């Protein structure tokens, strides 16, 4: 029997550290320029965590803002899923710290790791909980402190990343054609070595830091993000012309523009916040949703495609009727 439940996003929130690091700031200690970074990536600035910022602290504030936006109380949350690659501790799950901070005693909480695709993965898992009738209200968070993971002496990676958190409240509805229409997840572990954290590095300052084959990531990201949006549209018997917005993972403006071009979607229908915040990994999509739903671009009834690709490689898409 087909479930009558669907999930829909009822609130969004975001939180970033106060410290703004511009490209000019980076060029003081690195052999790089604002012009190079803007032309290759569209990034002008990123936020960097201060000593008191943690994934849990930013994730908590983003969640509180999303709950307020949704008019939902913390005690009514059934589940908390945090997508992160930079948890505050290897154990326990950072999601449990957020649960405690929020006072969401009725919820169960866990972390999910799919790197830059983490939010789309977490949204899909949350959607399954709601479709099955298991949960009614799920808090889905993407939060990463990428400043913990980059080698600040490697100009080819460190300029790309930033710190931040975004959250959405997902609730059940039985309204037909509303909310999350479908989600689609993929991975290809043969690309494991294209982007990884080097835990075996000999020198302590390089241990655990990001190693990336930028060109491979760039080419694959365009191909698979466009393909996964097409898969979602085909499954729902919709076309690119039906889309009001695409919210793609914010890795590089050139990648976002190329995905839009590949799909035949006008570039101005692709929400882009990368200039101010850079790549915050699992946080980019919920942050973009928070920005664009609060500035009035995303309106009720809009059809939105979410798509992301990250290390692994992992990738996926979701279609949502706002
Ligand atoms: N400033 C100045 N020069 C630089 C910098 C920098 N910050 N970084 C690299 N360069 C140099 C390189 O050393 C190279 O010099 P060389 O030709 O003398 O060897 C030159 O610039 C060109 O480098 P390319 O790698 O060819 O530049 P490209 O146009 O491919 O852009 C970039 C590089 C921006 C990394 C691009 O490949 C990219 O965006 N890849 C995707 C990576 C990504 O987004 N990763 C995020 C995680 S995965 C995800 O989120 C999907």
Image (spheres, rainbow, N blue to C red):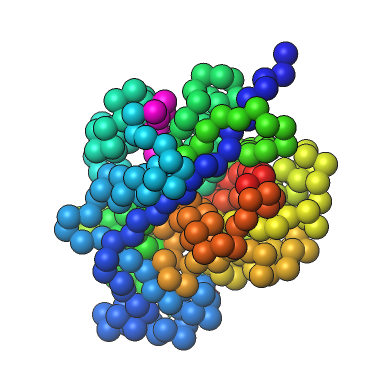
Residue at 66% in and 58% down: 245
- From this viewpoint, is residue 203 visible? no
User: Is residue 93 one of those drawn in magenta?
Assistant: no
Is the N terminus in the top left, top right, bottom left or bottom right quadrant?
Answer: top right
Residue at 40% in and 42% down: 67
Near-viewer residue (36 or 277): 277
Residue located farthest toward the front when viewing the structure as drawn: 71
Near-viewer residue (69 or 241): 69
Vertical position of residue 42 compared to residue 199: above or below? below
Query: Over which residues does the magenta segment extend?
Result: 76-84
Taking 272 as reference, is 12 left or right? left
Vertical position of residue 122 compared to residue 257: above or below? above
Count the numbered circles shown.
Answer: 0
- From this viewpoint, is residue 64 visible? yes
Residue located farthest toward the left when viewing the structure as drawn: 51
Near-viewer residue (281 or 291): 291
Res 76 quadrant in image: top left
Residue 36: x percent and y percent? 47, 82
Residue at 17% in and 55% down: 52
Near-viewer residue (273 or 174): 174
Taking 254 as reference, is 251 left or right? left
Vertical position of residue 96 compared to residue 71: above or below? above
Residue 259: x percent and y percent? 67, 62
Residue 88: x percent and y percent? 25, 43
Residue 269: x percent and y percent? 67, 65
Residue at 35% in and 77% down: 22
Residue located farthest toward the top when viewing the structure as drawn: 1
């Amino acid at each position: 029997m087909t479930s009558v439940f669907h999930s829909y996003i009822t609130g969004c929130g975001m939180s970033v550290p106060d410290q703004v690091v511009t490209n000019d700031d980076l060029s003081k200690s690195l052999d790089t320029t604002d012009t190079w970074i803007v032309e290759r990536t569209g990034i002008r600035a990123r936020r960097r965590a201060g000593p008191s910022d943690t994934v849990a602290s930013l994730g908590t504030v983003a969640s509180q803002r999303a709950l307020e936006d949704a008019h939902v109380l913390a005690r009514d949350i059934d589940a908390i899923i945090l997508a992160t690659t930079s948890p505050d501790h290897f154990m326990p799950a950072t999601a449990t710290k957020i649960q405690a901070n929020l006072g969401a005693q009725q919820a169960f909480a866990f972390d999910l790791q799919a790197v830059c695709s983490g939010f789309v993965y977490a949204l899909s898992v949350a959607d399954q909980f709601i479709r099955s009738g298991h949960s009614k209200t799920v808090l889905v968070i993407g939060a990463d402190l990428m400043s913990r993971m980059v080698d600040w002496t490697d100009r080819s990676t460190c300029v790309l990343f930033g710190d931040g958190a975004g959250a959405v409240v997902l609730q059940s509805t039985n309204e037909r054609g509303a909310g999350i229409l479908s989600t689609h997840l993929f991975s290809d572990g043969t690309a494991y070595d294209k982007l990884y954290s080097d835990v075996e590095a000999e020198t302590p300052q390089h241990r655990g830091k990001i190693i990336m084959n930028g060109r491979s990531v760039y080419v694959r990201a365009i191909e698979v993000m466009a393909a996964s949006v097409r898969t979602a549209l085909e499954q729902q018997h919709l076309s690119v012309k039906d889309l009001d917005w695409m919210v793609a993972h914010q890795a590089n403006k050139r990648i976002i523009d190329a995905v839009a071009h590949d799909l035949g979607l006008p570039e101005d229908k692709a929400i882009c916040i990368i200039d101010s915040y850079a790549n915050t990994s699992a946080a980019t999509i919920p942050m973009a949703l928070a920005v664009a739903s609060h500035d009035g671009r995303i309106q009720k009834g809009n059809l939105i495609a979410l798509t992301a690709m990250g290390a692994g490689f992992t990738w996926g898409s979701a279609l949502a009727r706002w």
